Amino acid sequence: MATRAADQKATSGRSRIPLDHKVHPGATLAFLAVLIVGLGYAGYSIFSDTQQVGETLAIGAFAFLGLALLIALGFEFVNGFHDTANAVATVIYTHSLKPVIAVVWSGVWNFIGVVFSTGAVAYSIITLLPVDLILGVGSAGGYAMIFALLLAAVTWNLGTWWLGLPNSSSHALIGSILGVGVANQWLTSTPGGTSGVEWSQATNVLLALLVSPVIGFVGAYLLLKLMKKVVSDPQLYEEPKQDTPPPLGIRSLLVFTCTAVSFAHGSNDGQKGMGLIMLILIGVAPTAYALNRTMPDSSTPAFIQASAAAQTVFRTKSGGATPDVETASATLRDALRQHDADRPQVYAALDSVSTDIVAELKNYGSIRHVPAAATKNLRNEMYVVYDTLRLLTKDEDKAKAAYPGGGDKKLKDYGKLLEDGTRFIPIWVKISVALALGLGTMIGWKRIVVTVGEKIGKTHLTYGMGAAAELIAASTILLAQVKGMPVSTTHILSSGVAGTMVADGAGLQSSTVRNIAMAWVTTLPAAMVLAGVLYAIFLWIVQAMRLG
């Protein structure tokens, strides 16, 4: 009680920003118009893509697809008003931008960040799932998986938002994926059944989530200390005056840092929804989306040449075995389940499946001409070969030693073409996610802004604190995007704000920091449990319907 009283006393004199603005009816209409246009654009794109490949979706399948996409876009919408509020907290609480202008500006730059993202983060999250669930995404288990992890993540995000806690959408989604994987493993009765979580990938992802807030705290702490030594302008380290914007130079700096965090958030967080949407599309409309049909016919000779080069490496390691394609595919799946690919029978399997892939491409001329009947099989073959190559070459030093004479490069070049053929994101998916994230930024941001802007430290953010926290946050998120690792904007920026408070000697509000830490700690296990339970329920319902 004494600590809480001290926290309240420390913050009672701070200036408050008026957050309750009446929304102009025109703004509401514009919001709804953009929302309707975005959903219409997504629907038209699906219809156009399926028509181009001669894939006709039944009304029931189209309705199912629409529901799944609405939930996936709903996740990004919630992500927008939950996570992106962190990006605007500093400009709002330093009076650099009016709240409405700040959230619209942030929403626009989130949109731009999503559109220009690489897609690497999207598939780094998807690879956490069991390989058999990914390959069988159109099965009952695949649909149960998608709905379970989406609903679990959205439910947890909404709950923590309602309580005003800066929870991480990244942690919620990754926890949901881990929960589905663990539940899937427990529900599998046979030893050779579907695997659980891809723990080797999960270790990398969890490490990124763990280390990034530490970087945010330490980086912002050191940067503010450096700024005080290098930049002597005392105004930079003052608290904002009531309803008075900072000088133009400081204001420009803070708007720039807000822009950078918003762009970085879109480029990283926006990809998480993209990967899930691609799983949905592949499950319901495989002919249109299982393979990258935008690859030109001219890419086929390069693919055949890369495959031939890689097969020379396979054959030196295979011991002369030549399994049939069905046996070879099963061997590769088993190797991925056990994370043990450096065996002669696996190299023989890689050789056989690669031969079949090349034969199909030669037969049809290119990926874009593969017929519906052959699409799913070819995609699955390319997917397991790529994942096996990724497993074999993930340690660069070991790969160079294991495949001398440039063999490691041959495998990586082949893997890159396999990746291009199966792991892609259509531009309309990027735009739809960008719209959902951008529109979400403009709704429901107030609760999180109050926590980050007022309740982490015992004093109001100074201009320098806001700039330092956001510069470090943007840099960390963009670096993670380049590395293909998902990170939490919420955790990094909240930690950065805390770091600047400590550097400035202001101190932290123990009650709020404790609540935030509890939300961080509980998100992964809570989302795992929720997703696992939902997956078991949905799987039971689907199986009961099939038996009935």
Image (tube, rainbow, N blue to C red):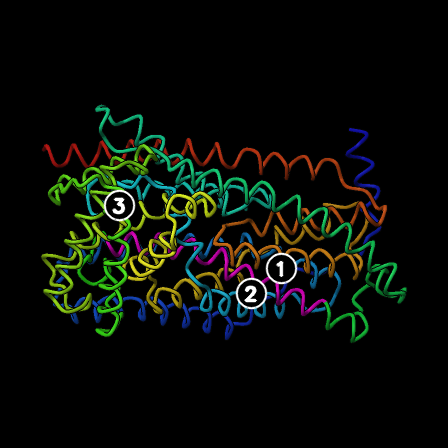
Q: Earlier in the sequence, mark 2 or mark 1?
A: 2
Amino acid at circle 1: Ala
Mark 2 and 1 residues: CB-CB less than 8 Å, in contact? yes
Residue sitting at 52 percent across and 65 percent down? 110
Residue 12: where, in percent of width, then height? Answer: 82, 47
162 inside magenta stretch: no
Q: Is residue 157 left or right of residue 182?
A: right
Residue 345's disc is none
Magenta span main SS: helix
At label 2, counting other C-alpha atoms closer than 10 Å, the crowd grade (few under 14, some 14-19, many 20 or more) is many
The answer to which of 532 and 305 lies nearer the viewer is 305
Mark 3 = which residue? 316
Residue sitting at 10 percent across and 64 percent down? 363
Mark 1 = which residue? 474
Mark 2 = which residue? 263
The answer to which of 344 and 528 lies nearer the viewer is 344
* Quarter of the figure with the N terminus: top right
Residue 425: where, in percent of width, then height? Answer: 34, 63
Residue 150 in sight:
no
- The magenta stretch spans which residues? 254-282
Residue 199: where, in percent of width, then height? Answer: 41, 35
Whole-Å distance between the Cαs marked 3 and 2? 47 Å
At label 3, counting other C-alpha atoms closer than 10 Å, the crowd grade (few under 14, some 14-19, many 20 or more) is few
Q: Earlier in the sequence, mark 3 or mark 1?
A: 3
Whole-Å distance between the Cαs marked 3 and 1? 46 Å
Image quadrant where residue 20 sits? bottom right
Mark 3 vs mark 2, foreground winner is 3
User: Seen from this angle, which residue lies furthest front?
Assistant: 405
The answer to which of 138 and 436 lies nearer the viewer is 138
Q: Is residue 516 left or right of residue 311?
A: right
Mark 3 vs mark 1, foreground winner is 3
Residue 76 in sight:
yes
